[in-house]
């Protein structure tokens, strides 16, 4: 897609329309990848893809031509099962050829089922829930020790915050005032077994995060105008770490995958479902 | 033999090495006065993180620091670190990064605190992890040399098992730690005692006793449990024909198991294992507990005699 080819170095300022086109293309790849692999996690990939698109194309200081430069912003996909979303955005942003995406979950590919550090642009392996926020805290502490200005973004699932490791780290980040740490909660309200409120009622997450000492903002995770506002808020000078709660829809963009746990960890069941998904997304090829 | 504190030496070395190695950061979970990381915290407060009683957060934050170019030392009591086995597995070992777990208070030498604190399965757990290396030092000389090695030569995960108790100094002052190499502390022709940590001093005393019974026992320190010095083990299996292992740990997934694996594949000889036998510990004085669990000097001597005479060879060990 020529709309973003050559997008290297500093983040660009793409229009909402352009971001929408990129995320549509990303959705298409997500569906193609899990259908080709006959496994994977489309539901939570489709709920986070708009935010990831915004972060990698408009917000984060990353450079595909110099991938490991020290001052880069870091992103940790703590909900490591949403690997199709991260891999796709990294490929579209130019970290590696999009052709490699179809190797997802296959024996001769680096694209492990869950997010793998061996993939260009990936900062840490993830897949066991609850650990990414702690890793993000460590990176944020290192930035402060080295007087670097880079930021650390951590993408959390809402089911994931049932893990105790998260809340230990919520306390610690507050203690160390890591204002360079930005957690983004993908609040799609569905986890593997069922709706989150049936599996483990979460109460008022904003209140909880605020009482743990974080600055909190809620936003619509599929509306680029709103996403823009959320990260503008996160970029303000502050003392505290930031907890952004993205209200999202599990399986967003594919009607039969929306708001259900059925496609948390399952691809389109057959060719008919596959084609329906591509059509609804508005796939271009 | 004079006895010295391994954890005290660890604290001193952290401070000494921290001076020139600004990449060193230290994390603890509210036990820094016991693990002695507090010494580093006092000297370099900006590089010391007391994470509170939150081991999972401690280990994942250490991973993040290591992923950002730091060398992270993580300390707590051995038993509490195993709570984070999965964080160690996923965030540290799978990423294969520079995090050193240096734990104190393992095994029955914890003493009066009792079974809840006396972990006896930790080295087995850690040896099972890909990319993890496991070291059980015998004395302060070894701790000192090991710390230099870890800081100056390595960038991958290590598990180092120190102790609450002081241990006798058994190594020569010019001793230099070599990963994957055993140390022959005493040579012998009839029997080899492979041991580490708390049991090294016991084994040396037992070897003296065995001499009176005309059994010439070698005593070999296997501080490097992983990687293991298989060549040395095979060499002594061949030359002495009888092997005794002694560890302050369960015999089912520890040093005894690792030695037995090597000889059974390469050169089968009689192996008798001294250690905890599928049981939890209990409160008591250290020296009382060694006798209670049949891991004292006399027990090693008795086992050595039996091993040499090949008694009980076909008896099933329960």
Image: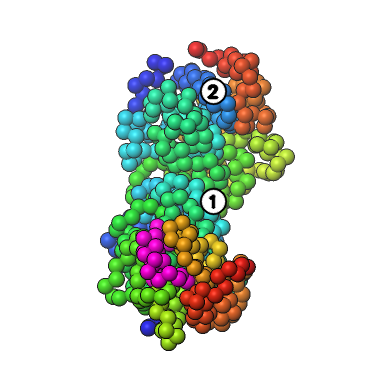
Q: Work out whether residue B9 or residue B45 is closer to the camera in this orientation and state it.
A: B9
Residue at point 43%, 45% (across, down) = B95
Q: Residue furthest top?
A: A285
Q: Work out whether residue B243 or residue B104 is closer to the camera in this orientation and state it.
A: B243
Query: In the structure shown, which secondary structural element does the residue marked by tag 1 occupy?
Result: helix
Residue at point 43%, 61% (across, down) = B267
- Left/right placement of residue B171 relative to residue A189 reads left
Give coordinates of residue A142: x percent, y percent: 39, 50
Point out which mark residue A36 bears: 2
Tell me how far mark 2 sits from mark 1, CA to CA: 31 Å
Find out whether the residues at labels 2 and 1 contact each other: C-beta distance under 8 Å.
no
* Subunit bearing disc 1: B
Q: Is residue B239 magenta?
A: yes
Q: Are marks 2 and 1 on the same chain?
A: no
Task: Classify mark 1: residues with Cα within 10 Å, few (<14), some (14-19) or many (20+).
Answer: some
* Subunit bearing disc 2: A
State the quadrant of the N terminus of chain A.
Answer: top left
Task: Classify mark 2: residues with Cα within 10 Å, few (<14), some (14-19) or many (20+).
Answer: some
Q: Work out whether residue A11 or residue A64 is closer to the camera in this orientation and state it.
A: A64
């Amino acid at each position: 897609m020529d709309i973003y080819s050559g997008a290297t170095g500093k983040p660009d300022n793409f229009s909402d329309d352009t971001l929408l086109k990129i995320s549509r293309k990303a959705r298409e790849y997500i569906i193609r990848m899990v259908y080709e692999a006959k496994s994977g996690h489309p539901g939570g990939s489709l709920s986070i893809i708009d935010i990831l698109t915004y972060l990698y194309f408009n917000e984060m200081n990353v450079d595909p031509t110099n991938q490991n430069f020290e001052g880069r912003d870091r992103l940790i996909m703590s909900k490591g099962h949403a690997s199709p979303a991260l891999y796709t955005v990294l490929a579209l942003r130019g970290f590696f050829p999009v052709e490699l995406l179809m190797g997802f979950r296959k024996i001769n590919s680096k694209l492990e089922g869950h997010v793998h550090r061996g993939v260009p642009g990936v900062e840490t392996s993830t897949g066991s829930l609850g650990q990414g926020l702690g890793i993000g805290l460590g990176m944020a502490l290192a930035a402060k020790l080295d007087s670097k200005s880079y930021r650390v973004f951590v993408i959390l699932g809402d089911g994931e915050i049932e893990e105790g490791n998260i809340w230990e780290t919520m306390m610690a980040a507050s203690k160390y005032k890591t204002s360079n740490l930005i957690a983004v909660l993908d609040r799609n309200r569905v986890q593997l077994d069922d709706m989150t409120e049936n599996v483990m009622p979460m109460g008022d997450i904003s209140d909880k995060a605020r009482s743990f000492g974080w600055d909190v903002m809620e936003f619509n995770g599929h509306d680029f105008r709103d996403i823009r506002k959320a990260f503008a808020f996160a970029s303000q000078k502050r003392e505290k770490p930031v907890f952004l709660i993205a209200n999202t829809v599990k399986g967003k963009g594919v009607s039969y995958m929306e708001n259900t746990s059925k496609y948390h960890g399952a691809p389109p069941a057959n060719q008919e479902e596959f084609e329906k998904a591509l059509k609804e997304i508005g796939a271009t090829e | 033999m004079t006895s010295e504190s391994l954890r005290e030496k660890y604290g001193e070395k952290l401070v000494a090495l921290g001076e020139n190695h600004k990449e060193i950061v230290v994390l603890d979970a509210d036990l820094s006065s016991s693990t002695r990381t507090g010494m580093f915290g006092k000297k370099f407060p900006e590089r010391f993180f007391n994470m509170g009683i939150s081991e999972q957060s401690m280990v994942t934050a250490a991973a993040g620091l290591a992923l950002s170019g730091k060398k992270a030392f993580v300390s707590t009591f051995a038993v509490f670190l195993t709570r984070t086995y999965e964080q160690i597995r996923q965030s540290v070992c799978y990423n294969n990064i520079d995090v050193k777990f240096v734990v104190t208070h393992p095994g029955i030498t914890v003493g009066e605190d009792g079974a809840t604190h006396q972990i006896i399965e930790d080295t087995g757990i850690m040896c099972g992890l890909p990319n993890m290396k496991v070291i059980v030092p015998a004395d302060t000389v070894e701790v000192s040399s090991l710390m230099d090695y870890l800081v100056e030569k390595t960038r991958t995960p290590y598990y180092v098992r120190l102790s609450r108790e002081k241990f006798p100094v058994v190594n020569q002052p010019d001793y230099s730690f070599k990963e994957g190499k055993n140390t022959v502390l005493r040579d012998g022709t009839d029997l080899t005692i492979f041991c580490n940590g708390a049991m090294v001093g016991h084994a040396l005393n037992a070897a003296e006793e065995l001499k009176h019974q005309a059994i010439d026992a070698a005593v070999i320190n296997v501080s490097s449990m992983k990687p293991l010095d298989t060549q040395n083990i095979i060499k002594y299996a061949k030359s002495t024909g009888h092997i005794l292992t002694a560890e302050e740990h369960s015999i089912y997934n520890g040093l005894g198991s690792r030695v037995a694996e090597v000889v059974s594949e390469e050169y089968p000889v009689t192996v008798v294992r001294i250690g905890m036998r599928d049981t939890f510990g209990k409160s008591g004085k250290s020296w009382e507990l060694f006798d209670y669990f049949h891991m004292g000097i006399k027990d090693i001597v008795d086992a050595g005699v039996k091993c040499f005479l090949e008694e009980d060879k076909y008896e099933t060990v329960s």
